[in-house]
Image (cartoon, rainbow, N blue to C red):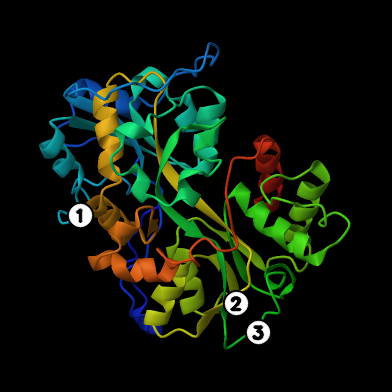
């Protein structure tokens, strides 16, 4: 999801909820007011060609050091706030004051998965990565293995998140989980009574899916539950054979024409249910909370398993400022930052200690800190055949 603080909007249909999280199309590349002209020029020019990844895997640094005075941060919009959108929402300045590391900040759109991988490793220190982006960085040797002993807050993150294959490789840690979420099936209880997850593909609609190639994994879970010849052997919905991938794609293309739509901005989900133009949708627990606060008759299927994802901070294999990079990684795990990013984005904090204040309700939505938080959740990882997933998905949404 990308940040669009759903301030909003639908008084005409009685939706009273004022905030929802997501990720809008980001404002290209934006630097903090303190960014140097040279850094700002680099940010606005985008990335150069990707160098080859050969050579041995670097080893984690032995000590963090005092800091180099600056750190280059590449972030998903909303993940590193400095007050540019809302003066009350800022934590980059706090980091600068506490560490003495000046932040050079730029944003990228993770929907354009090739962009982050095209950043030369020497051009940034840390990056907030989706499973798709992080997987590519690890595959290309552009992410550095981390010495977690240098991260004071690392052990506060649940082991389930710390050991996800989207942040680990060959017994090494490459990412520090930041926020996470699950994909749920919401439905208009006044119009439909779905039998189960398969209703997302069999209902007459209209239904709404998240516009992301990894949504094919949700179809794979339906195939697995149906126990058909092609689905019975599915162990992990993000690890599919060509035949299984084709069958998952087929679920999206069967049925009535025009009954499926695809969302990128989460406000589309809220508007769809608020106006009655959507019967079912692939969404998040926070969507459900917003709609219920707006007194809309929306319910959620409680069946498990479901898919989910965790976004993480990663360090460049050629980070120019590794000491400040480690300070940034540690800072983002703090309870204060976790509380702020969760409340701002409507996503679950990786560190349960962030479940205070404005984040308390969101943590309740995601059952953070309980035994049920991760129950029945398949967390996303970039598939080995990711290009095939992108190709199948492009046919579906075209």
Give x and y (percent) for residue 171. 54, 32
Crowd tier of the residue under label 2, counting other residues whose Cα lies within 10 Å: few below 14, some 14–19, many 20 or above: many
Q: Nearer the viewer, mark 3 or mark 2?
A: 3
On the image, numbered disc 1 is attached to which residue?
A: 89
- Give the quadrant of the N terminus: bottom left
Give x and y (percent) for residue 108. 39, 38
* Foreground pick, 126 / 368: 368
Q: Secondary structure at mark 2?
A: loop
Q: Name the quadrant containing residue 208.
A: bottom right
Q: Name the quadrant containing residue 92.
A: top left
* Foreground pick, 63 / 395: 63
Q: Name the quadrant containing residue 98.
A: top left
**Alpha carbons under labels 3 and 2: distance apart:** 10 Å
**Alpha carbons under labels 1 and 3: distance apart:** 40 Å
On the image, numbered disc 3 is attached to which residue?
A: 193
Crowd tier of the residue under label 3, counting other residues whose Cα lies within 10 Å: few below 14, some 14–19, many 20 or above: some
Q: Secondary structure at mark 3?
A: loop
Crowd tier of the residue under label 1, counting other residues whose Cα lies within 10 Å: few below 14, some 14–19, many 20 or above: some
Residue at image coords 81%, 52%: 233
N-terminal of the pair, mark 1 or mark 3, is 1
**Alpha carbons under labels 2 and 1: distance apart:** 34 Å
Give x and y (percent) for residue 297. 50, 85
Above-or-below relation of 80 to 209: above
**Res. 113 in view:** no
Looking at the rendered structure, which numbered label has been put on residue 279? 2
Is the C-beta separation of discs 3 and 2 under 8 Å? no
């Amino acid at each position: 999801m990308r940040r669009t603080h759903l301030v909003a909007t639908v008084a005409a249909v009685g939706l009273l909820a004022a905030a929802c999280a997501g990720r809008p199309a980001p404002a290209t590349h934006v630097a903090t007011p303190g960014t140097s002209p040279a850094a700002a020029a680099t940010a606005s020019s985008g990335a150069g060609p990707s160098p080859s990844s050969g050579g041995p895997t670097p080893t984690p640094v032995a000590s963090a050091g005092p800091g180099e005075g600056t750190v280059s941060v590449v972030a998903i919009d909303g993940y590193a706030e400095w007050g540019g959108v809302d003066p009350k929402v800022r934590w980059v300045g706090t980091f600068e004051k506490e560490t003495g590391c000046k932040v050079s900040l730029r944003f990228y759109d993770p929907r354009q998965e090739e962009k982050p991988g095209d950043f030369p490793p020497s051009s940034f220190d840390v990056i907030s990565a989706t499973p798709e982006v992080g997987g590519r960085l690890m595959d290309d040797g552009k992410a550095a293995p981390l010495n977690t002993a240098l991260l004071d807050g690392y052990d506060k993150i649940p082991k389930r998140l710390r050991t996800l294959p989207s942040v680990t490789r060959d017994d090494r840690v490459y990412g520090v989980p930041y926020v996470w979420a699950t994909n749920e099936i919401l439905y208009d209880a006044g119009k439909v009574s779905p039998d189960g997850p398969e209703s997302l593909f069999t209902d007459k609609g209209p239904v709404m899916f998240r516009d992301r190639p990894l949504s094919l994994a949700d179809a794979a879970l339906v195939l697995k539950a149906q126990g058909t010849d092609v689905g019975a052997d599915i162990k992990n919905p993000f690890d599919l054979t060509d035949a299984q991938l084709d069958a998952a794609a087929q679920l999206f293309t069967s049925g009535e024409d025009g009954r499926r739509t695809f969302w990128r901005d989460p406000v589309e989900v809220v508007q769809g249910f608020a106006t009655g133009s959507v019967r079912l949708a692939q969404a998040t627990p926070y969507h459900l909370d917003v709609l219920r606060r707006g007194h809309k008759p929306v319910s959620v299927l409680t069946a498990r398993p479901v898919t989910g994802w965790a976004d993480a901070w990663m360090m460049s294999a050629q980070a120019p400022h590794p000491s400040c990079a480690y300070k940034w990684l540690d800072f983002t795990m703090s309870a204060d930052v976790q509380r702020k990013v969760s409340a701002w984005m409507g996503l679950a904090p990786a560190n349960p200690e962030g479940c205070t204040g404005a984040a308390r309700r969101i943590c309740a939505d995601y059952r953070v800190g309980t035994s049920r938080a991760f129950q029945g959740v398949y967390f996303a990882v970039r598939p080995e055949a990711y290009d095939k997933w992108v190709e199948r998905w492009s046919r579906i949404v075209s």
